[in-house]
Amino acid sequence: MTSTGTILPFDQRDRGTGQKNSDNGEKEHLQWSRPRTEACDQDNDHHGNGKTEPCVDSWMTTKCVAPGGGYTQNRSVNVDNDPVRKSRYYSDESSTRLCKVQYRDPQSSSGRHRFYMWTSGCQMNKDDSERLARDLISKGHSPVNHPDRASVIVLNGCAVRDNSDRKVWGRVGALKAEKRKRPDLLVALTGCTANAPDEEKAPYRDTLDVVFNSRDSAPLINLLDEFPGPVTDDWEAIDPDAIPGSGDVTRYVTIIYGCNRRCTFCIVPFRRGPEESRSPTAILREIELKVGEGAREITLLGQIVNKYGQYLEGEASLASLLRFLDEKQVSPRLRFLTTHPRHFDEDFAVAMGELPSVCEEINLPIQAGDDLVLKRMGRGYNVDFFRSRIDLLRTHVPNVAVSTDVIVGFPGETHEQFNRTLDVLTEIEFDVVHVAAFSARVGTVAAKWPDDVSPEEKLDRLHEAEAVQETIARDINSRLVGSLQEVLFEELRPSPVVGGRPRWAGRTRSSKLVFCESAADVEAGDIRDVEIVDATAWSLRGEVAASVAVA
């Protein structure tokens, strides 16, 4: 059977639906699927009535049985004679945070799917996966926590580095063999990898059933409607641990999509498309939903998050959005990722310093400490301008923690230029530095330049930058010993020592990782005062103060 609607057969994908450049130079998103057959290779008399039916669940470890004429499977129940269970659904407001499951008539020819969501890359991909999972659940499909139990596998891929893309294609290649064993298995691809050039996707088209934009789940949902899944009863329990984001006390909300800048090393604008800000009311609704599910901290996301609102009506900005959300008191804590120095202004710094819910922490990438390297990167600022942003920030937010990103081994970077980067790290004293060796991405300007810094030299520079930063971070963290810090506890982790007690892990408002010995009166999501008793370059150790939990 050939897919219909927005999903086109393979021989039509490159005519009108392939990725192409529009008149204004913006890249359109690609969606395509390949035709599939509905029949399974194995037919069985599941119900003992002499009728042979397609084996829609042959990959399950539990045999399909039907007591009393109903159809049951692993983790399913016979509800034909139980009107209470037959009408049951899980509410978003449930204390167990299970999600609502849409009822479907068991006599319907359209069976529901069990889906597994695999996510790689940044926080934005994680947020996209949560939203896609919610869309699928609203259509009656059930999340599972292992791909072997899934009838559809959704890969949400990252493309920020060449190795990231390779990881995704490796996963797709592994599923090719799995599909030979399970012909009815559906495989979907989304995320930044979905907008890779056609020639990059070509070797995997026989494995992928649909490639779609993560902002629009319709092509995926249409495919699942076209090819029914194995769940044909009207009720099946959902494991909350299989739902992306379920139970997390820290959640993400994307507020601006895409990027209009063209840094010479970055592939993201070509994969994520042009900038588009969401409305404040839509953002508020999503935050309220996630807080209602147990979130205590929300991080607002964007490729350049402080460009939020530039194309909305009125004078919208990240500063105005933060004031709006703080006034609504939607979450005890608000963060944001990632800012760009060129778009950092005083109003933004003032908002950070005066709003109680906004945490005193920011990621402000410098990328390099040499003006010529910054110019060749297309960053739009020099080192002096970056210093002025740091001064502005620390004036209005005195205790702010600043993290940054640095690329070493950029084409043409000399030892002298690299040493200037080390000097800037020492001068500014960042709390955290994410160091990456330059990796050429096909399609970017920098990929056309000679990659003249050897891999060995890149690795040496990376290690040298990390060593400088380790010393700085240890000194900064040691200043916190003896202080009282507000900590949001996220999870109980096993002890790093054999036989040791588990430890609670949480973060301060400045995003410092804190470990505390397990305490009976601490739960995930609690915000407590913690006395810091020890520090390393990477984390703090503390003791929960005998005080009332912070609201």
Image (cartoon, helix red, strand yellow):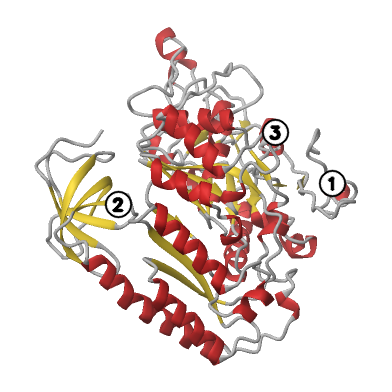
- Badge 2 amino acid: Arg
Residue occupying the point 43% across, 21% down: 91
Q: Secondary structure at mark 3?
A: loop
Report the disc number at residue 406: none
Q: In this rendered view, identify the residue nearer to me: 488 or 394.
A: 394
Q: CA distance from mark 1 to mark 2?
A: 45 Å
- Badge 1 amino acid: Thr
Residue annotated with mark 3? 313
Q: Secondary structure at mark 2?
A: strand
Figure check: 28 above or below 79: below
Q: CA distance from mark 2 to mark 3?
A: 36 Å
N-term mark: 2 or 3: 3
Q: CA distance from mark 1 to mark 3?
A: 31 Å
- Badge 3 amino acid: Glu
Q: Residues within 10 Å of mark 3 (few under 14, many from 20)?
A: few
Residue annotated with mark 1? 17
Figure check: 165 above or below 45: below
Q: Residues within 10 Å of mark 1 (few under 14, many from 20)?
A: some
Q: In this rendered view, identify the residue nearer to me: 197 or 170.
A: 197
Residue annotated with mark 2? 507
Tag 1 and tag 3, C-beta contact below 8 Å? no
Q: Secondary structure at mark 1?
A: loop
Q: Is residue 371 visible?
A: yes
Q: Indicate the position of residue 390 as horizontal and vertical percent values.
A: 46, 63
N-term mark: 1 or 2: 1
N-term mark: 1 or 3: 1
Going by the image, does 128 lie left or right of 462?
Answer: right
Which residue appears farthest toward the left when viewing the image? Answer: 546
Figure check: 109 above or below 199: above
